[in-house]
Amino acid sequence: MSVSQQKKQFIYVGNDNPVTFEGVQDADGNFVSNAAVTMTLAHPDSPSVNLLGSAVTLSYVTGSNGRYRGVIQSTVLLTAGVTYELIISATVNGDAQTSIKVAAEALTRTT
């Protein structure tokens, strides 16, 4: 999934789910390659509690304009039909640059 807008995303139960976060910039609007970008999933019934194993550090994609990638591992226990909250935060030189929350519905892959 590519998370560059706040629209509903889909994640698959029992599968590795790659996540791309686009366009991380500093306070001056410059794309950055040195951000600390983290991602977690929260259950809708307990939004302040991250799912076990869902905390992921995203890595910079060399040569990109602020693109970072990570993977939600297949071992994260998801329930099909539940819409989780995907939370991505980026910090540059200790200063929070952005934090977004995106709905991510868990589905069972059929093919």
Image (cartoon, rainbow, N blue to C red):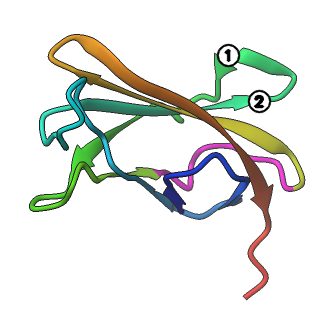
Q: Are marks 2 and 1 in contact (CB under 8 Å)?
A: yes
Mark sitting on residue 49: 1
Classify residue 89 as left or right of residue 111.
left
Classify residue 41 as left or right of residue 47.
left
Q: Quadrant of residue 37?
A: top left
Mark sitting on residue 28: none
Residue 73, position as x, y percentages in the image: 49, 51
The disc, 2 or 1, on the residue closer to the chain's N-terminal end is 2
Q: Quadrant of residue 97?
A: top left
Residue toward you, 96 or 48: 96
**Callout 2 secondary element:** strand
* Residue underneath mark 2: 43
Gap in Å between the C-alphas at discs 2 and 1?
7 Å
Q: Is residue 75 above or below residue 29?
A: below
Residue 93, position as x, y percentages in the image: 15, 16
Q: Is residue 88 above or below residue 106?
A: above
Q: In the rendered structure, does residue 60 fall within the stretch colored magenta?
A: no
The main secondary structure of the magenta stretch is: loop
Residue in the picture at 75% in, 39% down? 84
> What kind of residue is marked 2?
His
Classify residue 41 as left or right of residue 64.
right
